[in-house]
Amino acid sequence: MNTTTSSILNFAAILTSSSGGTCFDDATCPILYKCVEGLCKHKEIFPLEPRECFGSILMTLLVGVANAGGMGGSFIAAPILMIIFNYSPAHAIRLVYCVVFGGSLGNFAINFLAKRQSSLKPLIDYDVSLIALPMLLCGTSVGVLMNSVTPPFVVIFGLVAVMGKSVKKLWIKTIKQYREENKPKERTIEVSTEFEIELKEVGDNKARNEDYQAYFMVVHNPRAYHIFQEDRLQIPWRKFKEFFILLTAILGLFLLRGTSSFGSILGIGYCSTGYWACYIFTLLICFIFERRARKSLLEAADLRNNVPLTSASDFTITPASAVDLRNVSLIGGVLAGFLGIGGGTIMNPKMLDMGLSCESAAATSGFFVIFTGFLSMFQTLIYGGLSFTEIVFFCPLAFIGSMAVTVIVRKLVKKYQRPSFIMVCVLMSVLIGVLAIPCFSVYRAIENPAMMTEVQGLC
């Protein structure tokens, strides 16, 4: 599946056995299960039990914290669904996709109207997204295949190693940011001379400079003027069109090739030559989209550099940084699919290294999750693994939590002038995943050690 969270949930399913079993009545079934035709099946969502109410509140808060930091929240949602809601691992896997998608929509609803403090550009960096998103989707698809032929103990080892490194890196950046915020601010001292010279700051200098910049570009470089205007659009429709075309192409090819449980609309056999041809063509489309985006963005960057005026961007695409972003996104996607760490775990620290602010990096990471989360949920719905009742319950739950917590964190950042609050949210999300997922997996593996070396196979 082309998702940034599917792999972690896949290996969780390998390490766990499905709940249920035979029964005589409800008393012989586990908590929140009912005996239906001699088999224990999980109860419907409604009416909610007290335990489920507690789990819903806990998930709303913790998933909100994760999304405030630009993470999908899969690390947090999976253990809650399996432990508190007592869903079988297989079904918890499918429900996580609803949580991730709903949370990412809430994060986007807050961020898509926000602007950067240092410029008039949107908080979400759509230029970075144009290059990173196709490679994340491409890499994730490859990573999921790698996961299916790899023993679970290898996946767990890699997961702990990569997430441990991410925690260390984020901790260092958080401490550095916190110390920067605590540095004493320089004071402006008014000096009076014997000549009583009055120094005044012209308040409309910024406006005059912007007017002159616009005039200069209209006269000397109309194309650059158009690019600068597009940079400031809250909803850059041209770039959004690219995202939706990519998403449509991937969904279309998914329907064309089919799966083991959902037949191809063209009658292509599962794991046949035609199936793998469609799969490879999907990867090629991702590379084509990335290549087109990189070429267009570099041309726009050249035009900006030819204008002898200050750019409104806090991050400038260069040939070297564009290639670096492409490579990191591809590697991040592979690791996301193989280890299930989520794209934000890799991309968030990288975007901070490239010069994006804490707020912009978190918002951009959250934007990635909208597409990966939707693809996950769509494919699972097609498989018949989700009901509309479950989608209607868990998506709004995560949506509300994401919006509420993100608003609170944003207000705290603005009130106390501490962008490190967002980095703390990112750090907490990854740290919870480091503690929860490996421990839960090891606990389940102890129950059935043989599953630690079990391999699913490509088909």
Image: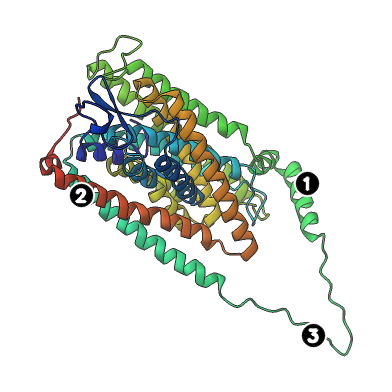
Work out whether 342 lies above or below 242.
below
Under tag 1, what secondary structure?
helix
Marks 3,2: beta carbons within 8 A: no
* Residue denoted by label 1: 215
3 or 2: mark nearer the eye: 2
The answer to whether 218 appears left or right of 355 in the picture is right
| Residue marked by disc 3 | 191
Q: Choose the circle earlier in sequence order: 1 or 3.
A: 3
Image quarter where the C terminus lies is top left
At 62% from the left and 47% from the top, the residue drawn is 304
Residue 378 picture location, percent across and down? 42, 26
**Residues at marks 2 and 1 touching, judged by CB atoms closer than 8 Å:** no
Q: Residue at x 45, y 24 (%)?
A: 388
In whole angstroms, how far apart are the C-alphas of marks 2 and 1? 64 Å
**Residue 96 seen in render:** yes
**In the image, what residue type sits under mark 3?**
Val
Q: Is residue 165 above or below residue 155?
A: below
The front one of 438 and 420 is 438
- Identify the disc placed on residue 16: none
Nearer to me, 34 or 407: 34
Question: Of marks 3 and 2, which one's residue comes earlier in the chain?
Answer: 3
x, y percentage for residue 193? 84, 88
Q: Residue furthest left?
A: 450
Image depth: mark 1 or mark 3 in front: 3
Residue 292 visible here? no
First-in-chain label (2 vs 1): 1
CA neighbours of label 3 inside 10 A, class few (<14), some (14 to 19), many (20+): few
Location of mark 2 (residue): 442
> Which residue occupies the extreme right position in the image?
195
